[in-house]
Image (tube, rainbow, N blue to C red):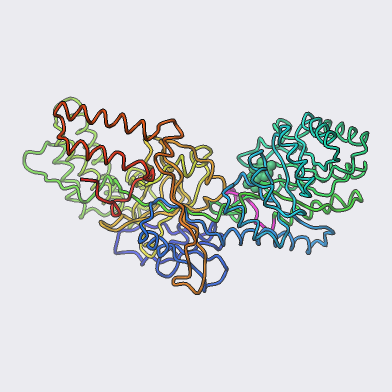
């Protein structure tokens, strides 16, 4: 991929910036999975139906939401994207099965822990109906949610640690005719299951999870391997099989399950695991077990950045390659052992949900070191090093060669250092220091432009200047609520402005959030730039909103966020494409974000009590004469008015007036 850095030349001397440049810079063509692109207006757009007639403009959606007075940040759910992902997954497997001449079928089951939101599960199941898609649950609560949703013949794979009440609910599900399969994770579960079923006078169907020796892959590698906390070892599996045989139940063991971790990076690891588990399957079948489903768990990866074409970046396979690898490997091992080919099951969660939602975050403000709005005056009275700095800046126009530019840069550094130590020693005042810093940053910014437009563009000092000159973009969101995996495990998420993509992004931004936590910043970015410690962005224009979109938020991030700094669930809007509607979309539903009082209630503060305390305080202050009665009451009202509000800030340009 040839990458043109966005800002390697001084303004005026470079070719105009195009939407193709933005696509390349933000790698939209890679992680966008054909859903997201830059349209001819320089806006982010969404194509959910694979046809130009139904593309939606994200700027138009945001404008419509603003007209309706919706609180930002807001999570946009593209329900059609969920449906498209279900289709792509199933069709990839069906193609692999057809190409290989595989003599059985494929069933996807959706692990609801990845995104339990009712609307998400419903949409996935509806889209998956033609493919017989089922569900996977990993807890009692998830089982309770899943049990009434499925048809009788679709799979409900019940993983996770199961207590007796969960096991007996699964048995009841089977008695009701549901295809709910308890996947035995340890021997104690089997003992409980046997006892409960015996009492109920019912012979249950079951599955078993095996611990593979193939080490896991990706960032969740502890889900597999000898030391995984899940599943039976091969020795335990054999002893379970003997118990089943003794009870005449071997033909009730229907599912063999394994899971080697999420976001599998390397297709070879997947093949190795598939080979191992199919070998186990073949032996079980040879011993008379009734295994019909071979469940390879989740882990189908998603491109968060450059994608599978580039070595060392993200996952090294496509959706179709994943399906081919699974189908061909299972087929090959079954043929070698002369056993019937099983129905292949996968529990892909991330791959179904990641793409469907994007978080829209307003930029509340920026802080640039070389802010041109900062005025300064250097007069006679300025100190010597300040005068010297000013002189370097003043002569910059006549400086041309990289050597001369370097000299100016070093001189600038030296003078600034001088000013700072003289300040520390008490010889210079704050005014002089402020003046020196303004001059220095102005100098750096002009030097950077000059280096880039000339032969010095590749000098190491250019990188140094870039890092020094990054701007802070204060964003109206919380990393801990909306991007927990970025903070916890360094997962990168693609981020880009939704607008002005036909304009050169000539600032280098670092995004910081609203939380008071120094970790509340995005630490690395998805872009074609070699240095991923910043994101090329535009300088926001005064009076104009500037929104960023955070993509691939639909898996895990939706639900794992905690209540850091008491930021709650963000508002969300459900968008459908429709060529009959103006701008090709309609908004089905807007769900407001969590109210402050609800977040507070989670940590045991309640409005009545807080109101009582606040009015006591106000009364005392009125009596002390600190505030006038009308003022005091207005403050109390203002305080109480916050309770039903959303936990996030309003962007400047949407701010409503505070109560008088
Ligand atoms: C988490 C989990 C999944 C989902 O994995 P993805 O990587 O999201 O596809 C599937 N199966 C089990 C058992 C899991 O724990």
In this rendered view, identify the residue nearer to me: 35 or 253: 253
In this rendered view, identify the residue nearer to me: 452 or 658: 658
- Dividing the image into four quarters, tell me where ligand 1 lies: top right
State the image coordinates of residue 26 (x, y, percent, origin top left). 46, 56
Please tell me which residue is depicted at 21% across the width and 26% down the height of the picture: 620
**Magenta stretch bounds:** 311-321
Would you say 337 lies left or right of 454 here?
Answer: right
> In the rendered view, would you say 417 is above or below 132?
above
> In the rendered view, would you say 21 is above or below 459?
below
Would you say 323 lies left or right of 419 here?
Answer: right
- Judged by its main secondary structure, the magenta piece is loop
In this rendered view, identify the residue nearer to me: 17 or 124: 124
Would you say 15 lies left or right of 52 here?
Answer: left
Task: Tell whether position 318 is magenta.
Answer: yes
- Report whether residue 527 is seen: no
State the image coordinates of residue 51 (x, y, percent, origin top left). 55, 72
Residue at far left of view: 380
Quadrant of the snapshot with the C terminus: top left
State the image coordinates of residue 30 (x, y, percent, origin top left). 54, 58
- Report whether residue 442 is seen: yes
Please tell me which residue is depicted at 41% across the width and 59% down the height of the picture: 498
Task: Tell whether position 335 is magenta.
Answer: no
State the image coordinates of residue 235 (x, y, percent, origin top left). 84, 31
Report the number of numbered marks.
Answer: 0
């Amino acid at each position: 991929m040839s990458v043109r850095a966005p800002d390697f030349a001084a303004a005026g001397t470079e070719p105009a910036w195009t939407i193709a440049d933005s696509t390349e810079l933000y790698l939209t063509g890679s992680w966008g999975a054909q859903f997201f692109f830059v349209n001819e207006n320089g806006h982010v757009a969404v194509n959910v139906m694979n046809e130009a007639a139904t593309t939606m403009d994200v700027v138009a959606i945001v404008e419509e939401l603003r007209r309706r007075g919706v609180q930002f940040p807001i999570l946009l759910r593209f329900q059609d994207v969920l449906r498209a992902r279900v289709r792509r997954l199933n069709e990839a497997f069906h193609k692999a099965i057809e190409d290989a001449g595989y003599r059985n079928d494929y069933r996807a089951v959706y692990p609801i822990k990845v995104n339990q939101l009712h609307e998400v599960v419903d949409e996935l199941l509806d889209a998956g109906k033609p493919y017989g898609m089922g569900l996977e649950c990993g807890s009692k609560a998830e089982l309770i949610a899943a049990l009434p949703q499925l048809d009788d013949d679709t799979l409900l794979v019940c993983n996770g640690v199961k207590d007796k009440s969960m096991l007996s609910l699964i048995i009841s599900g089977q008695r009701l005719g549901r295809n709910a399969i308890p996947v035995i994770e340890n021997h104690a579960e089997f003992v409980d299951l046997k006892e409960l079923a015996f009492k109920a006078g019912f012979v249950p169907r079951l599955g078993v999870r095996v611990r593979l020796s193939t080490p896991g892959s990706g960032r969740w590698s502890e889900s597999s391997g000898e030391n995984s906390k899940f599943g039976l070892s091969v020795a335990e599996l054999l002893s379970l099989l003997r118990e089943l045989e003794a009870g005449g139940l071997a033909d009730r063991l229907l599912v063999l399950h394994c899971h080697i971790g999420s976001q599998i990076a390397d297709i070879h690891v997947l093949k190795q695991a598939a080979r191992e588990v199919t070998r186990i399957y073949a032996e079980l079948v040879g011993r008379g077990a009734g295994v019909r489903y071979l469940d390879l768990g989740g882990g189908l990866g998603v491109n968060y950045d450059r994608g599978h074409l580039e070595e060392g970046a993200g996952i090294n396979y496509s959706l179709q390659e994943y399906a081919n690898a699974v189908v061909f490997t299972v087929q090959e091992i079954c043929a070698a052992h002369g056993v019937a080919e099983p129905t292949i099951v996968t529990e892909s969660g991330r791959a179904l949900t990641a793409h469907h939602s994007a978080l829209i975050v307003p930029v509340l403000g920026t802080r640039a070191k070389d802010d041109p709005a900062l005025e300064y005056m250097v007069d006679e009275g300025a100190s010597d090093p300040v005068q010297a700095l000013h002189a370097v800046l003043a002569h910059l126009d006549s400086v041309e060669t990289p050597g001369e530019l370097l000299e100016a840069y070093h001189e600038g550094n030296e003078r600034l250092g001088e000013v700072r130590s003289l300040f520390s020693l008490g010889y210079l005042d704050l005014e002089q220091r402020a003046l020196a810093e303004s001059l220095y940053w102005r100098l750096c910014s002009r030097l950077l432009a000059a280096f880039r437009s000339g032969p010095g563009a590749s000098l190491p000092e250019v990188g140094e200047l870039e890092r020094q000159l990054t701007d802070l973009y204060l964003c109206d969101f919380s990393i801990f609520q909306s991007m927990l995996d970025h903070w916890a495990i360094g997962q990168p998420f693609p981020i880009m402005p939704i607008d002005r993509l036909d304009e050169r992004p000539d600032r280098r931004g670092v995004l910081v959030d609203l939380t008071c936590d120094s970790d509340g910043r995005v630490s690395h970015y998805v872009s074609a730039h070699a240095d991923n410690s910043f994101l090329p962005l535009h300088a926001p224009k005064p009076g104009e909103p500037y929104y960023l979109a955070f993509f691939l938020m639909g898996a895990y991030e939706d639900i794992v966020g905690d209540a850091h700094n008491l930021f709650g669930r963000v508002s969300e809007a459900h968008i459908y494409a429709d060529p009959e509607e103006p701008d090709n979309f309609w908004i089905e539903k807007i769900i407001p974000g969590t109210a402050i009082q609800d977040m507070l209630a989670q940590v045991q503060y309640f409005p009545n009590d807080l109101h009582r305390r606040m009015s006591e305080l106000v009364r005392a202050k009125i009596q002390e004469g600190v505030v006038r009665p009308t003022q005091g009451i207005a403050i109390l009202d203002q305080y109480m008015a916050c309770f039903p509000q959303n936990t996030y800030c309003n962007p400047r340009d949407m701010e409503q007036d505070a109560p008088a």
